[in-house]
Image: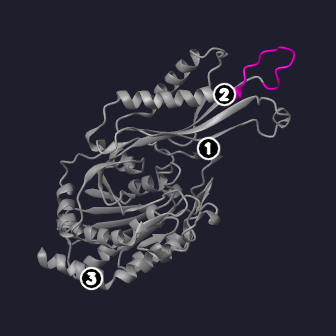
Amino acid sequence: MAATTQQIDAWLEAHRDELIQFLQQLVRIPSESLPPKGSEAAAQAFVEGAYRAAGAEVDVFDPIDVPGLTEHPVYHPVWGDMDRSLENRPCVVGVFRGTGGGRSLLMSSHIDTVGADDPALWTEAGPFSADIIDGKMYGRGTYDTKAGIATGLFAIRCIRELGLELKGDVIVESVSDEEFGGSHGTLACRLKGYNADIAINCEPTNMHVAAATRGGGQWRIEVQGEAGMALGGVERVSSSYKIAWVIEALRQYNLKRNAEIPTPPLYAHEPGLPLYVSQIGGGGDTFAEDQGAAPPSCYANMWCEVYPGTTAEEHAEEIQTFVNGYLDGIEGFDGEYPEYTLELRFLPGSETSTAHPIFGHLEDAYQATHREYVVQGAPFASDGYVFNLHSPTPVVTVGVGGDNAHAPNEYIYVQDLIDLTRIFARTMVSWCG
């Protein structure tokens, strides 16, 4: 194995610039998901060409064309109040066949990104520049998760170009429609039969190995009130006050649950669950609002995460029971409870037992690469649940280090890109045989 390790290191050193330039080219092709559509096709054509050039058997398909997708319980055809388009949003799968008798490995990443935002907010480099500054590559999708596509592809290229024959198959996939609770690309690949003995989902974990991912849901909470102004001594129940009470209730709910819920061992490094109120609004273009009076309704959008094992029904019941109970204790509350709407699908958390043998193989690969090996839970929700709950393929999550996912100045550490490719190549050799 020592000779193989040296060969892998030498190959990566010789192809370092090519790996970096591949990711830069991919980042420079926008693949944003913007409600209610995605624009992955051009970037996926680039990935398809790279998979074919590396010698893979390649399959390209839109999720909506996969039999069984629309009947599956994970299928979620809406994006808020809009129909979710799954046409011209291809997935690309590349299969590198082994000689037989070995375990298979699947490398999964998503090509779609959130929007780039206002370019003026990108103070280090442009959102599609892929510029490298002080060892960091900037650009939308570098971190989440185009780096994963690059590491998986170059890891298997390394193995094949070194002439190292693997017994088990290696599958690399670039899926569409992951952002904003999509999951359809990941599900479509499972339904088409692209499963393996283990999957590595390349969501960014800052080089840690994640045995679990959290779940979560995005809610719109809307309250009704009496519009207008309180003239002539008439008392009115303002929706503005009611939404303020709801927001305080959410804060109290999160404090209470984090004080009472036991922290799972995989999350001991980061105890507590986040709850974010991401948007507050109300009134719209109404006469009452223009005249400085209370609007008839107000809303708050909220993202709330849960540990693996919590169901969508439990999540909804817990939030609504607490918030409604809190409102009951407010003097002046009119007794009309909020309307709770799950804006995007609920993403369940999921976990793979750390007794699974893949963890030993990853640990050896980390040690051979002289990188710290840490197993923990990932502090985010992802498509990992599709593997663990809806396929025969268990999953671990491993990705590069960086920052600012879903924000301006998204970046990765270039050295992590190189080192993670080394780790994946070593894992392929030991796992697949």
Image quarter of the N terminus? bottom left
Q: Is residue 6 magenta?
A: no
Mark 2: which amino acid?
Val
Please tell me which residue lies in front, 154 or 60. 154
Q: Is the residue under label 3 in contact with that under label 2 (CB below 8 Å)?
A: no
- Residue 100's spot in the image, x, y percent? 19, 68
Q: Is residue 92 visible?
A: no
Mark 3: which amino acid?
Trp
Q: Is residue 3 visible?
A: yes
Find numbered disc 3 in the image and state the secondary structure of the residue it sits on.
Answer: helix
Image quarter of the C terminus? bottom left
Residue 121: quadrant of the picture:
bottom right
Residue 11 is tagged as: 3
- Magenta segment's dominant SS is loop
- Residue 117's spot in the image, x, y percent? 61, 60
In primary-sequence order, the first of circles 2 and 3 is: 3
The residue stretch that appears in magenta: 227-242
- Which residue appears at 40% of the width and 75% of the height? 51
* 28 relative position to 291: left or right: left
Please give the residue where the numbered disc 1 appears in the rendered image: 80
- Which residue appears at 41% of the width and 29% of the height? 257
Separation of residues labelled 3 and 1 (CA atoms) = 47 Å
Residue 80: quadrant of the picture:
top right
Find numbered disc 1 in the image and state the secondary structure of the residue it sits on.
Answer: loop
- Residue 7's spot in the image, x, y percent? 20, 81
* 347 relative position to 335: left or right: left
Q: Classify 10 Å Cα crowding around label 1: few (below 14), some (14-19), many (20 and above).
A: some
Which is more foreground, mark 1 or mark 2?
2
Separation of residues labelled 2 and 3 (CA atoms) = 60 Å
Residue 193: quadrant of the picture:
bottom left
Please tell me which residue lies in front, 182 or 95. 182
In primary-sequence order, the first of circles 3 and 1 is: 3
